[in-house]
Structure formats: C-alpha cells, structure tokens
Image (cartoon, coloured by chain):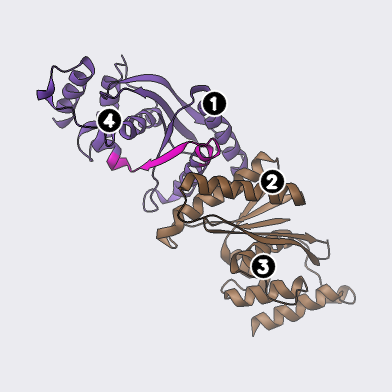
Chain colours: A brown, B purple
Amino acid sequence: MLGIDPGLTRCGVGVVDVAPDRSAVLVHVGVVRSDPDAPIEERLAIIARGLRAVVDAHEPDVVAVERVFAQHNRATVMGTAQASGIALLVAGERGLAAATHTPSEVKAAITGYGNADKRQVQTMVARVLRLEELPKPADAADALALALCHAWRGAPAQAAASGPLTPAQRAWADAERLARR
Amino acid sequence: MLGIDPGLTRCGVGVVDVAPDRSAVLVHVGVVRSDPDAPIEERLAIIARGLRAVVDAHEPDVVAVERVFAQHNRATVMGTAQASGIALLVAGERGLAAATHTPSEVKAAITGYGNADKRQVQTMVARVLRLEELPKPADAADALALALCHAWRGAPAQAAASGPLTPAQRAWADAERLARR
C-alpha cells in the first residue's frame, strides 16, 4: 500500500505492508521534493519522476492519495491539487487502483477520531509500525497514515473476544486509548 | 504555440503558428475527452496520453495553460486543477516552457477587454485565424484563445502609422472594434 500526501515542495510517500489482522510493517518512507524557485512544469515533472521511482521500487497494489479541498490554504491549494493530480496519474499509468481520503477520514481511521492533531497521528503511526521515533517530516508521516487508513478501511473489526491480541493488535489498542485521552 | 484549456471531461487543445506581425494560422484544434464514469486515475492517464499525442504531433515551442482559481465552480475546480497539473507536467516532461494565463488575461489579449463573453472571444479567434465557423466546442476555442494570448503577449504593438495593415492586422483591428461594441 502506497500513501501519498501531495504537495509541490514536499510530497510525502509511505509504503506499508498490511496483514489481514491489520498489523503493518514499514516498507519505505520518504519525501519527494521540488525546488520552489523552479518553474511549475519542471516541479511537476520532478514529482512525477520521484513518485514513479517509488512505485517501480516497491510495486504497491493500491495508491492512496490525500483529497485536497478548495477551501483550505487558498494560496497553495492549487499547487497541492496539481500535485495530487500527478500522484493519481502515476497510479493510473501503472494500472494501479487509486483512492482518495480526506484528512478527517485518515485521522479517524488512525486515532479513532477525526479531529486528532498531527502529533497524535504521528504517535499512532509510529506505534502501529513499531518505529522508535516519530516519522518525519510530517508529510512522510501523513503518507504512512494514509496508506494505513486505506488498508484498514473496510477491514473487519478485530473483536477482543475472538482470541488473544497479537502484539500489533495490542499496540493498536494501546495507541487507540492513548489517542483518545 | 499550444494552448490547453484544462478539464477532466473535456480538455481543449489548440495549436497555432504565430508570425512576428501577430498574424496566426490554425495548425490543430481539438478536445481530449475522458469518461466521467471512469476512475479519476484512469481519466488523468487518458488526458496525459491525449496531450502527449498533440505535443508529439505538432512539436510546439511553448505550452500555455489556463490558470485555475479555487474560488470558481467549487464542485469541479479540483478536477480542473488536476487536469491543469497534467497539462503542465506534459510540457515539463518534454522540456517545453509552460505559461499560465487567467481567463481575464486571455479575454483582454483577444478582444481588448477582460470581461468579454465567450462568444466574443470565439468570434475574435475565428477572425484572427480566418475560420469560416466559430471553433467548437467552447473548450477548443478557449485553447486557441490561450495560445494566441500567449503568443501575442509582450509582442511589440503594431502602430497603424508604421505602414499599411497586413490582412491579419486588418482582421484584428476589425475584430477588436466588433468586440468592443
């Protein structure tokens, strides 16, 4: 599962391998950058090249991209929308299915509620993936959160009564409690 | 000069050959379409393929793309922004310079004032390019207008006093008068 947090200056990318029991392993995390002083057409070409390199290296089944809204951050929203178009294009050109999720959907999927702050999301992502540090920069963490959100979406809930929790489920349950504080 | 009026369902493309005296010849006009029922990643890939085909067939020096604003047509603006990102990407990947112009800039360049309606722009484009009919659909006409706008931008003004008008200059002067009525 490849998650992409679209942006012109920093485009976060995160690849996770998610098991049916919702446990997940970090495969790749990074940021595709483009120079803010470069012409827009060159920036988009650099982003496309960087995203294609990630797709070709990790061969995801699905690409999840953050949905961009017109009403947020007017000054940069058009650039973000263009970068999201490039992310979706790269998926389409490789014959991969793509999905978009809103920031609220991602926060709800990861922390249990849609108004979680960035640090709570990062903390949860780090726990679920058993990372020793919070994934940085925030764009990279958001990309991992997107990938997890999409992988978990529609997955059957893991009832605690169905058996002992796996380590990943325990981390998840702990993290959910933490995030709800 | 290639002009692109970005859109997901209809992406207008127009290629014109513009002489230093501002006279212009139509090289190609058309629309790249994508199925509104197809997934967004496939639609963007279809648009990219269609635009690349136009670039490869006509080898423009510059690509002019209409600038998209967040405040207009909220429901479709994100798709239009994504399509504009694809248009700019195609230019960047081919090493072509790209430029963006606002609808007002295009109208002002073509008709002499920024609040001209679509039909006035189409009429002017048809006159300048000596077309027997108005270019259709509107997206294709807008793409031609964009290409002309960019080609004419910064071109030295043709003072009537500097000599007899060429046929193209006469058509232009006639059309400007018509558009100002």
Label 2 near label 4: C-beta < 8 Å? no
Give residue B121's mark: 4
Question: Label 1: chain?
Answer: B
Q: Which of the two discs, 3 and 4, sits closer to the camera? A: 4
Quarter of the view holding residue A6: bottom right
Confirm whether residue A112 shows in the render: no
Q: Position of residue A164 (x, y in %)?
A: 89, 77
Per the image, the residue denoted by label 2 is A97
Residue A43 marker? none
The subunit carrying tag 3 is A
Chain identifier of the residue bearing label 4 in the image: B
Q: Quadrant of residue A154?
A: bottom right
Q: Position of residue A47 (x, y in %)?
A: 58, 50
Q: Amino acid at mark 1?
A: Asp
The residue to which callout 1 is attached is B56
Q: Position of residue A169 (x, y in %)?
A: 81, 74
Q: Quadrant of residue B49?
A: top right
Q: In this orientation, which residue lies closer to the viewer: A111 or A73?
A: A73
Q: Are discs 3 and 4 located on one and the same chain? A: no
Discs 3, 1: same chain: no
Q: CA distance from mark 3 to mark 2?
A: 20 Å
- Sort mark 4 into few (<14), some (14-19) or many (20+) by Cα contacts within 10 Å: many
Magenta part of the chain = B89-105
Q: Distance of mark 4 from mark 1, alpha carbons?
A: 28 Å
Query: Which residue is denoted by mark 3 in the rendering?
Result: A109
- Residue kind at label 4, given as amino acid type: Val
For image coordinates 66% across by 80% down, the residue present is A179
**Mark 2 neighbour class, 10 Å CA radius: few under 14, some 14 to 19, many 20 or more:** some
